[in-house]
Amino acid sequence: MEVTETQSNITISEDRLRWFTQLYEDAFPKVARFVANRGGSFEDARDIFQDSLVILYEKTVLEKLEITVSSEYYLVGIAKHLWIRKFNDDQKKVGLEATESEITIPADYFDTSFNRLASLLELTGRKCVELLQAIYYDNLSLKEIKSVFGFSSVHSASVQKFKCIERMRNMVKAKSMGYEDFK
């Protein structure tokens, strides 16, 4: 009787399944114990074991690597390496809560920034403040600005927006150069 390729593949698949089952029975308890002794959970052990099994399979079957020790010990060694690497990576991560408690923001930080901006806006004039607020805060279109503010055209609303922005820029420049009374 001649063995066909399909029958050969079935035999290989059955052998591979027995190999995986045997590795699971022999090596998983050792990996689980190792992970648990180092602060990991059962889920961590399963993940590490499965990753190790994939690596072992790729090395031995796909890359045809000759292993001089038993597959079980090789698998446990891979798992230990993966867990130590994962554990060290997790140790380097700092929780946001710990970092957040160390950061201090001066009490006047927001107030000063806001007050400075408000005073500069105030210097541009009430009409400019209202126009810029309608454009940038209320997100009104220039067509809506035209009707709300009574401009004759969308073009004149756009020109007024530009003038207000330029006035604001000039105020900022003047303040940064030390001209406190610039208007």
Image (tube, rainbow, N blue to C red):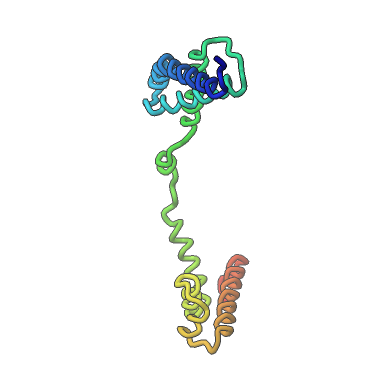
Residue 133 x %, y %: 47, 73
Residue 119 x %, y %: 49, 70
Q: Nearer the viewer, residue 59 or 115?
A: 59
Residue occupying image coordinates x 39% and y 17% = 29
Residue 93 x %, y %: 47, 35
Residue 34 is at least partly visible in this image: no
So how many labels did they put on this image?
A: 0
Name the residue furthest bottom: 152
| Image-based side of 86 in relation to 5, left or right | left
Quadrant of the image containing the N terminus: top right
Residue occupying image coordinates x 50% and y 22% = 10
Q: Nearer the viewer, residue 117 or 52?
A: 52
Residue occupying image coordinates x 59% and y 81% = 159
Q: Nearer the viewer, residue 89 or 43?
A: 43
Name the residue furthest front: 1
Residue 78 x %, y %: 52, 20
The part of the image, by quadrant, that contains residue 39 is top left
Residue occupying image coordinates x 47% and y 72% = 139
| Image-based side of 67 in relation to 133, left or right | right
Quadrant of the image containing the C terminus: bottom right
